[in-house]
Image (tube, helix red, strand yellow):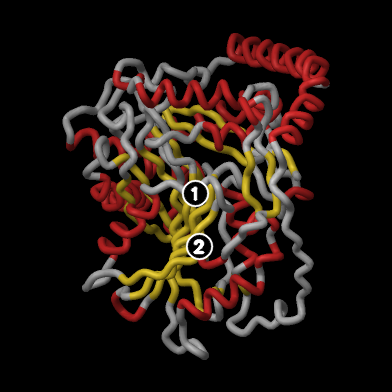
Amino acid sequence: MQRLSGLDSMFFYMETPTNHMHMAGVFLLDPRGASGGFSYARVRAMVERRLHRAALFRRRLVEVPFGLAPPVWIEDPEFDLNFHLRRACLPTPGGRSELEDFVSQIVGSPLDRQRPLWEISVVEGLEAGLQAVVVKMHHAAMDGVSGSELAAAWLDLSADPSSDIHEKDDWHPERVPSDKDLLVGAWAGLASTPFKMVSTTRRIAEAVLRVSEHNRDSPTVPPPPPFRAPRTSFNLAITSHRRVCFGEAALEDLKVVKNHFGCTVNDVVMALCAGALRRFLLARDELPKEPLVALVPMSVRADEERLSAGNRLSAMLTSLATDISDPLLRLRAISAAMSDAKSQESLLGAGLLTDWTEFTFPALIGGAAHFVSSTRMFDHVRPAFNVTISNIPGPQVPLFLAGVPVVGIYPVGPVVEGAGLNMTVMTYCGTVYFGLNGCRATVPDISDLPSMITESLEELLTVVQRP
């Protein structure tokens, strides 16, 4: 058995009937010309050969009675690969909208918590002879960075990999622990909690003091605090239904803007999302006077943890400067805000969020999450933030899945109560892929956003090229 970390446990217990805490990746494939073609059977055979490459594929969670401690991973004695692999065919014409609708259904349904927390759907019937593989994994098992690296268990650098043919698989299932076993392990962990809590509380107090002194002496406006974001129509209580859509941009275009203004590619990504949201809210006649606030997850994964599962995350809040109409001034404001947020995050320390969650009882997290959801609390209070924007590093070399070239990767992150829109970004082979996920009830017109992202990029490129 292996116990979940406090942060992983938080993602597990944050889940409610309306708040699904899983992520997805949509791999677009071009089988034309691929040796042996492409089929569900070929994907299944490849996955079966490589299950041993990542332990979580055959592990499931067992909860501790009364939520006294985080759940434990066990090697699932009832593991059934057929349960995790699905086959689907899109309705004609099999274009982008049909694929987005299918992914919306996948993202809008929860994973079975009594089984290993992942699914794969092999999707046929796309136009132009393309195929897709949709991978869904729970946030309790991984963050965006570890998820992309664990997906490498199924991805290759060539169309004819042979490295998995002679690999050994010495996997052995475990028995499901009894309640007594789980409670004994929980009490053993609780015995050392007070000593660790004293040390962690001291570090948190010192970090907060450092941030307060920094913000008091800083000439710039400090990052926005939680629950000070303006309210919009997508900052309400969410339903269980989702709408997903995709967008792309050329990485070279983002670099042109980045080089001209002396900022980072991530600053440009944030500016594109901000520009699109400003257009989106103006079209709805509901742009708030205050700037929108984004939650930006940050990986704090060390090099030696790169292939490990679980979450190694921190997060920062930053202004999106949506109150500024000029795209150049907005980009500069966002770049400055991101710099300030990073400075504050460094003062807090990379492990602060992880340390704090180690002392939060799972039962309390679960109870709070269900209370917020059942009472629709965010219909009545200001949101902690408006939107989640996550930029996941992606490979810049061509990849293959089951011998077939991957020609696109769209990442999809979860939405949360009070912030029914997630904009996740990944760069692959010179293209920046946007995966937008929204609550169907609060962001029904989410499909307008990809074109608005494109318009925001064109607006910045026009400024760059202006004589």
Residue at 46%, 50% (x, y): give it.
Answer: 425
Tag shown at residue 247? none
Could you say where residue 392 lies in the image, as x and y percent from the top left? 54, 50
Pointer 2 and pointer 1: residues touching (CB < 8 Å)? yes
- Label 1: few (<14), some or many (≥20) within 10 Å? few
Q: Who comes first in sequence, dot 2 or dot 1?
A: 2
Q: Picture coordinates of residue 91 (x, y %)? A: 24, 70
Asked which quadrant contains residue 156, the reply is bottom right
Q: How many marks?
A: 2
1 left or right of 466?
A: right
Mark 1 falls on what kind of element? loop
Residue 433, horizontal then vertical, whole percent:
43, 57
Position in image of residue 222 (x %, y %): 52, 18
Q: Is residue 348 visible?
A: no
- Relative to the observer, which residue lies in front, 463 or 53? 53
Is residue 63 depicted above or below 103 in this figure? above
Residue with the mark numbered 2 = 83
Residue type at mark 1: give it. Answer: Asp
Q: Report the residue marked by disc 1.
A: 112
Left or right, residue 68 beside residue 450: right
Name the amino acid, label 2: Phe
Q: Against 63, is 228 above or below?
A: above
